[in-house]
Image (spheres, rainbow, N blue to C red):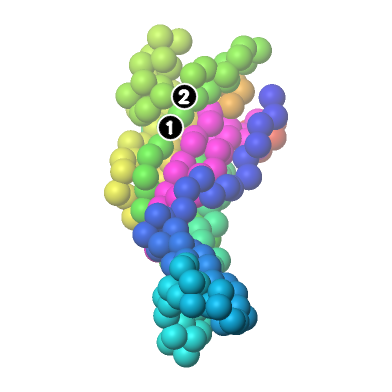
Amino acid sequence: MEFDDRQRRVRRSPLLFVAPLVLLILLTLVLLWEIVRWNITGDLARQWPWRLRLMDMNPLGALLAVALAAVFGRAQYARTVRPALGWSSSWTVGDLGPDEPGWHVEVVNGGSQHSVVERVDYCFVPRGGEPTAWTDHAGVLEELADRGFVQGKDYYLRLTGAGFPLGNGGMRAGAYGRRFVGEIDQLRLRLRVTDAVGDSHERVMDLMRGARMERPGS
Protein backbone atom coordinates (compact mmCIF):
# COMPACT_ATOMS: atom_id res chain seq x y z
CA MET A 1 0.00 0.00 0.00
CA GLU A 2 1.89 3.01 -1.32
CA PHE A 3 1.88 6.50 0.20
CA ASP A 4 3.80 9.72 -0.27
CA ASP A 5 6.86 9.57 1.98
CA ARG A 6 8.64 12.64 0.61
CA GLN A 7 9.68 15.35 3.04
CA ARG A 8 7.66 18.54 2.76
CA ARG A 9 7.57 21.94 4.40
CA VAL A 10 4.24 22.42 6.15
CA ARG A 11 4.67 25.86 7.75
CA ARG A 12 6.91 28.91 7.49
CA SER A 13 7.92 31.09 10.40
CA PRO A 14 5.58 34.12 10.59
CA LEU A 15 8.29 36.29 12.14
CA LEU A 16 11.32 35.30 10.08
CA PHE A 17 9.58 34.81 6.72
CA VAL A 18 6.31 36.79 6.61
CA ALA A 19 7.60 39.96 8.28
CA PRO A 20 10.54 40.64 5.86
CA LEU A 21 8.33 39.79 2.88
CA VAL A 22 5.58 42.18 4.02
CA LEU A 23 8.18 44.91 4.57
CA LEU A 24 9.54 44.38 1.06
CA ILE A 25 6.05 44.62 -0.45
CA LEU A 26 5.24 47.82 1.47
CA LEU A 27 8.50 49.49 0.46
CA THR A 28 7.90 48.47 -3.16
CA LEU A 29 4.46 50.07 -3.07
CA VAL A 30 5.93 53.27 -1.58
CA LEU A 31 8.55 53.31 -4.35
CA LEU A 32 5.87 52.96 -7.04
CA TRP A 33 3.87 55.77 -5.42
CA GLU A 34 6.87 58.09 -5.40
CA ILE A 35 7.70 57.27 -9.04
CA VAL A 36 4.15 58.05 -10.13
CA ARG A 37 4.03 61.23 -8.01
CA TRP A 38 7.32 62.53 -9.42
CA ASN A 39 6.01 62.12 -12.98
CA ILE A 40 2.93 64.26 -12.38
CA THR A 41 3.43 67.93 -13.26
CA GLY A 42 1.40 71.09 -13.52
CA ASP A 43 -1.58 71.99 -11.38
CA LEU A 44 -2.39 68.35 -10.76
CA ALA A 45 0.85 67.92 -8.80
CA ARG A 46 -0.38 70.51 -6.26
CA GLN A 47 -3.67 68.71 -5.68
CA TRP A 48 -4.55 65.98 -3.21
CA PRO A 49 -3.46 63.17 -3.05
CA TRP A 50 -0.46 63.87 -5.28
CA ARG A 51 0.94 66.33 -2.72
CA LEU A 52 1.39 63.40 -0.30
CA ARG A 53 5.10 62.61 0.01
CA LEU A 54 5.81 59.39 1.85
CA MET A 55 9.61 59.20 1.78
CA ASP A 56 12.64 60.62 0.04
CA MET A 57 13.99 58.45 -2.76
CA ASN A 58 17.50 58.01 -1.31
CA PRO A 59 16.52 56.48 2.06
CA LEU A 60 13.70 54.60 0.34
CA GLY A 61 16.14 52.98 -2.07
CA ALA A 62 18.46 52.02 0.81
CA LEU A 63 15.62 50.48 2.83
CA LEU A 64 14.37 48.60 -0.22
CA ALA A 65 17.83 47.14 -0.83
CA VAL A 66 18.09 46.04 2.81
CA ALA A 67 14.65 44.40 2.73
CA LEU A 68 15.44 42.62 -0.53
CA ALA A 69 18.73 41.34 0.89
CA ALA A 70 16.94 40.14 4.01
CA VAL A 71 14.37 38.16 2.00
CA PHE A 72 16.92 36.49 -0.27
CA GLY A 73 19.39 35.96 2.58
CA ARG A 74 16.73 34.31 4.68
CA ALA A 75 15.72 32.04 1.78
CA GLN A 76 19.32 30.97 1.21
CA TYR A 77 19.94 30.34 4.90
CA ALA A 78 16.70 28.35 5.16
CA ARG A 79 17.95 26.00 2.44
CA THR A 80 21.24 25.63 4.27
CA VAL A 81 19.71 24.62 7.61
CA ARG A 82 16.79 22.62 6.18
CA PRO A 83 16.65 19.18 7.79
CA ALA A 84 16.97 16.00 5.73
CA LEU A 85 14.79 13.50 7.53
CA GLY A 86 15.27 9.80 6.91
CA TRP A 87 15.71 6.48 8.64
CA SER A 88 18.06 3.50 8.70
CA SER A 89 17.21 -0.05 9.74
CA SER A 90 18.72 -3.50 10.06
CA TRP A 91 18.24 -6.80 11.85
CA THR A 92 20.16 -6.92 15.13
CA VAL A 93 20.22 -9.23 18.13
CA GLY A 94 19.71 -8.14 21.72
CA ASP A 95 17.11 -5.37 21.58
CA LEU A 96 14.20 -7.66 22.52
CA GLY A 97 16.12 -10.42 24.28
CA PRO A 98 19.58 -11.98 24.54
CA ASP A 99 19.20 -14.16 21.43
CA GLU A 100 16.11 -12.60 19.86
CA PRO A 101 16.59 -10.89 16.49
CA GLY A 102 14.77 -7.61 16.02
CA TRP A 103 14.27 -5.06 13.24
CA HIS A 104 16.15 -2.07 14.66
CA VAL A 105 15.14 1.35 13.26
CA GLU A 106 16.75 4.77 13.77
CA VAL A 107 15.50 8.12 12.52
CA VAL A 108 18.25 10.42 11.27
CA ASN A 109 18.60 14.05 10.28
CA GLY A 110 21.13 14.51 7.51
CA GLY A 111 20.88 18.30 7.55
CA SER A 112 23.72 20.61 8.52
CA GLN A 113 22.07 21.66 11.80
CA HIS A 114 19.87 20.03 14.39
CA SER A 115 16.09 20.31 14.39
CA VAL A 116 13.58 20.18 17.24
CA VAL A 117 10.79 17.62 17.25
CA GLU A 118 7.39 19.29 17.08
CA ARG A 119 5.14 16.22 17.13
CA VAL A 120 5.19 12.49 16.37
CA ASP A 121 2.17 10.45 15.21
CA TYR A 122 1.73 6.80 14.31
CA CYS A 123 -0.53 4.51 12.36
CA PHE A 124 -0.11 0.94 11.11
CA VAL A 125 -1.42 -1.38 8.44
CA PRO A 126 -2.10 -4.96 9.62
CA ARG A 127 -1.51 -7.82 7.18
CA GLY A 128 -4.26 -7.64 4.57
CA GLY A 129 -6.01 -4.73 6.35
CA GLU A 130 -6.47 -0.98 6.02
CA PRO A 131 -4.43 1.79 7.68
CA THR A 132 -5.54 2.80 11.16
CA ALA A 133 -6.18 6.41 12.12
CA TRP A 134 -3.25 8.61 13.12
CA THR A 135 -2.67 8.63 16.87
CA ASP A 136 -0.01 9.38 19.45
CA HIS A 137 2.40 6.98 21.17
CA ALA A 138 -0.07 5.91 23.85
CA GLY A 139 -2.82 5.41 21.28
CA VAL A 140 -0.80 3.13 19.01
CA LEU A 141 0.38 1.07 21.98
CA GLU A 142 -3.23 0.54 22.98
CA GLU A 143 -4.26 -0.50 19.45
CA LEU A 144 -1.33 -2.91 19.18
CA ALA A 145 -2.15 -4.37 22.60
CA ASP A 146 -5.70 -5.07 21.36
CA ARG A 147 -4.11 -7.22 18.65
CA GLY A 148 -2.05 -9.17 21.18
CA PHE A 149 1.32 -7.43 20.82
CA VAL A 150 3.26 -6.79 24.02
CA GLN A 151 5.51 -3.74 24.29
CA GLY A 152 9.00 -4.86 25.30
CA LYS A 153 8.47 -8.44 24.12
CA ASP A 154 7.10 -8.42 20.57
CA TYR A 155 8.32 -4.93 19.86
CA TYR A 156 9.68 -1.79 21.46
CA LEU A 157 8.42 1.63 20.30
CA ARG A 158 10.34 4.53 21.76
CA LEU A 159 8.45 7.51 23.14
CA THR A 160 9.72 10.77 21.63
CA GLY A 161 8.04 13.99 22.67
CA ALA A 162 7.97 17.58 21.51
CA GLY A 163 11.19 19.47 22.14
CA PHE A 164 13.55 16.56 21.49
CA PRO A 165 16.66 17.81 19.59
CA LEU A 166 17.21 15.73 16.47
CA GLY A 167 20.78 15.96 15.23
CA ASN A 168 22.75 13.93 12.73
CA GLY A 169 23.58 11.39 15.43
CA GLY A 170 20.20 9.72 14.93
CA MET A 171 17.28 8.87 17.18
CA ARG A 172 16.24 5.34 18.02
CA ALA A 173 12.69 4.72 16.81
CA GLY A 174 12.25 1.18 18.06
CA ALA A 175 12.84 -2.53 17.56
CA TYR A 176 10.36 -5.08 16.21
CA GLY A 177 10.39 -8.85 16.55
CA ARG A 178 9.70 -11.49 13.91
CA ARG A 179 6.05 -11.91 14.85
CA PHE A 180 5.46 -8.17 14.63
CA VAL A 181 7.16 -7.98 11.22
CA GLY A 182 5.11 -10.95 10.01
CA GLU A 183 1.72 -9.53 11.02
CA ILE A 184 2.15 -5.77 10.48
CA ASP A 185 2.64 -4.71 6.86
CA GLN A 186 3.47 -1.09 7.65
CA LEU A 187 4.21 0.93 10.76
CA ARG A 188 4.07 4.58 9.72
CA LEU A 189 5.73 7.31 11.72
CA ARG A 190 4.77 10.91 10.91
CA LEU A 191 7.52 13.18 12.17
CA ARG A 192 7.26 16.97 12.23
CA VAL A 193 10.28 19.08 13.19
CA THR A 194 11.16 22.77 13.41
CA ASP A 195 14.44 23.96 11.93
CA ALA A 196 16.76 26.81 12.90
CA VAL A 197 14.73 29.48 11.06
CA GLY A 198 11.39 28.39 12.53
CA ASP A 199 10.02 26.51 9.51
CA SER A 200 8.21 23.21 10.09
CA HIS A 201 9.02 20.12 8.01
CA GLU A 202 7.23 16.79 7.96
CA ARG A 203 7.89 13.31 6.63
CA VAL A 204 5.99 10.03 6.86
CA MET A 205 8.20 6.94 7.15
CA ASP A 206 7.35 3.25 6.96
CA LEU A 207 9.47 1.68 9.68
CA MET A 208 8.76 -1.83 8.34
CA ARG A 209 10.15 -1.16 4.86
CA GLY A 210 12.72 -3.80 3.93
CA ALA A 211 12.18 -5.87 7.08
CA ARG A 212 10.89 -8.97 5.28
CA MET A 213 13.50 -8.87 2.53
CA GLU A 214 16.34 -8.87 5.07
CA ARG A 215 14.66 -11.09 7.67
CA PRO A 216 16.98 -13.77 9.12
CA GLY A 217 16.35 -17.05 7.33
CA SER A 218 14.55 -15.44 4.38
Q: Residue furthest bottom?
A: 58
**Mark 1, other Cα within 10 Å: few <14 / some 14–19 / many ≥20:** some
> For this rendering, which residue is in front, 53 or 102?
53
Q: Are marks 2 and 1 in contact (CB under 8 Å)?
A: yes
Identified at 32% across, 50% down, the residue is 164
Q: Residue at x 46, y 68 (%)?
A: 48
Front-lying residue, 176 or 36: 36
Instruction: State the residue in front, 115 or 73.
Output: 73
Residue that badge 2 annotates? 134
Q: Position of residue 190 (x, y in %)?
A: 49, 36
117 magenta-colored: no
Q: Is residue 13 visible?
A: yes
Which quadrant: the N terminus?
top right
Q: Position of residue 155 (x, y in %)?
A: 43, 27
Image-quadrant location for residue 114 = bottom left
Total numbered labels placed on residues in the image: 2
Q: Which residue is mark 1?
A: 121
